[in-house]
């Protein structure tokens, strides 16, 4: 049970995609993937960045689930 992350796969995938989109558009990402054999240095840079995004996403999601959110003030009665 200790290996089960405190976030869903969908949350993780969404966070990774969001981080990757900060640098690569969908079409740019496809271009890098399509040309991985003809431009290996470009692919290696993309792949290293994607792996970094995955690590950042995991760390951020774990931090968010372990950090208690501030409590919202109670609504005043009579309003």
Image (tube, grey):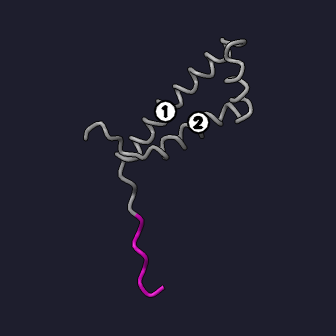
Question: Are dots 2 and 1 in contact, CB under 8 Å?
Answer: yes
Say if 38 sits above or below 15 in the image: above
Residue 21 in percent (x, y) is at 65, 36
Q: Which of marks 2 and 1 is nearer the N terminus?
A: 2
- Residue at 74 percent of width and 33 percent of height: 27
- Residue at 32 percent of width and 40 percent of height: 4
User: Which residue in the structure is indicated by mark 1?
Assistant: 56
- In which quadrant of the rendered view does residue 46 lie? top right
Label 2 – label 1 distance at C-alpha: 9 Å
Say if 78 sits above or below 6 in the image: below
Residue situated in front as seen by the camera: 26 or 70: 26
Say if 69 sits above or below 41 in the image: below
Under circle 2, the secondary element is helix
Under circle 1, the secondary element is helix
- Residue at 70 percent of width and 36 percent of height: 26
Residue 10 in percent (x, y) is at 49, 46
Say if 70 sits above or below 50 in the image: below
Inspect the magenta stretch and tell me whether residue 74 lies in it. yes
Residue situated in front as seen by the camera: 35 or 79: 35
Residue 69, numbered circle: none
- In which quadrant of the rendered view does residue 58 lie? top left
User: Which residue in the structure is indicated by mark 2?
Assistant: 19
Inspect the magenta stretch and tell me whether residue 50 lies in it. no
Q: How crowded is mark 2: few (under 14 residues within 10 Å), some or many (20 or more)?
A: some
- Quadrant of the rendering where the N terminus is positioned: top left
Q: Is the magenta stretch mostly helix, strand or loop?
A: loop
Disc tally is 2
Residue 23 in percent (x, y) is at 67, 31
Q: What stretch is highlighted in magenta?
A: 72-79
């Amino acid at each position: 049970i200790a290996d089960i992350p405190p976030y869903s796969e969908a949350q993780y995938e969404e966070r990774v995609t969001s981080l990757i989109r900060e640098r690569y558009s969908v079409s740019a990402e496809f271009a890098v993937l399509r040309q991985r054999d003809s431009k290996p240095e470009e692919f290696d840079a993309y792949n290293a960045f994607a792996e970094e995004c995955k690590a950042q996403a995991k760390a951020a999601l774990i931090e968010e689930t372990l950090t208690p959110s501030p409590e919202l003030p109670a609504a005043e009665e009579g309003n």
